[in-house]
Amino acid sequence: MSRPVTGCIVMYQNDRTKLEAAIGSTLSSDLVEKLYLVDNSPTDALRDLANDDRIEYLHNPANPGFGAAHNLAIAAVLGNSRYHIVINPDVYFDAEAITSLVTFMDEHPEVGHTMPKVLYPNGDLQYLCKTNPTPFDLFARRFLPGGLQKLFAKRMAAYEYRDKDRNPAHDYDRTMFDIPYLSGCFMFLRTDTLERVGFFDERIFMYIEDADLTRRFLQVSRTAYFPGATIHHHFEKGSHRNRKLMWYSIQGAFVYFRKWGWFGR
């Protein structure tokens, strides 16, 4: 029987050590049939990382953005795999993570999109289940100084499902269903549902395309957070340090809210 999983990593002049960890983690699973490396870098200096017969390397120096680059792989895998993984270049995990996710999805055919438990390299939990964002939520997390953020601590905790004391269903130690917004660092997608949902919105260069895609999945299927599988994520928050990346995040938010509305969740 054909192996049921494909994956894609989009690269742009990334740290080679982290890339090698992400690639090696993915290919450590025998369930992975094909891994696409879509390289948006100006040169193909990273081409030598395609050193396995399961890897297909695509040099894409025009750099149309994160979602548009992933769409190249999605177009190739629709109808050719059961599950497809959108993988950040700064994650790493054991082969068992993919096995556990395949088992979970096989047992829950109503789920189209799943995210595993995500940890920092030091083992701390990343709170990556979120409600649908609002302009205020994004502005407060990015621009409000710490003192002012404390005034909205309850709202921010609810936004990131960190309010288990007030909402026991928000428990990162348990499987949670119908999450409105799952992080794009590792998106485990059922391909027949993905075919119904459509591709990443290429008007969004990067950063909030994961919120848009999760929202569209939830319109036609269930979404899930599954802590039975774990990955590690360096989570560098480039838009907090780089003005160009910050502009991409603002531009993507504008596209997102024009599409879904500026008020309410």
Image (spheres, rainbow, N blue to C red):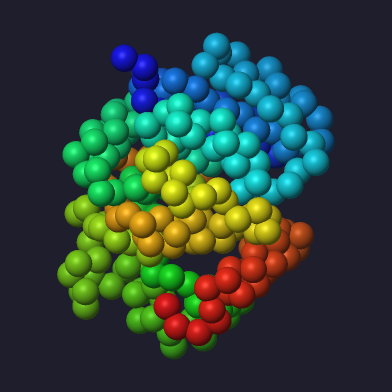
Front one among 14 and 265: 265
Residue 101: x %, y % from top left? 29, 37
Q: Quadrant of the N terminus?
A: top left
Residue 44 location, quadrant? top right
Residue 204 location, quadrant? bottom right
Left or right: 247 as drawn, with respect to 103: right
Q: Total of numbered circles in the picture?
A: 0
Front one among 194 and 28: 194
Left or right: 214 as drawn, with respect to 138: left
Residue ID at (73%, 29%): 59
Residue ID at (52%, 16%): 54
Q: In this rendering, does residue 53 appear at all?
A: yes
Residue 4: x %, y % from top left? 36, 25
Residue 246: x %, y % from top left? 69, 64
Q: In this rendering, does residue 228 appear at all?
A: no
Residue ID at (52%, 25%): 35
Residue 245: x %, y % from top left? 71, 58
Q: Quadrant of the C terminus?
A: bottom left
Front one among 120 and 227: 227
Front one among 63 and 79: 79
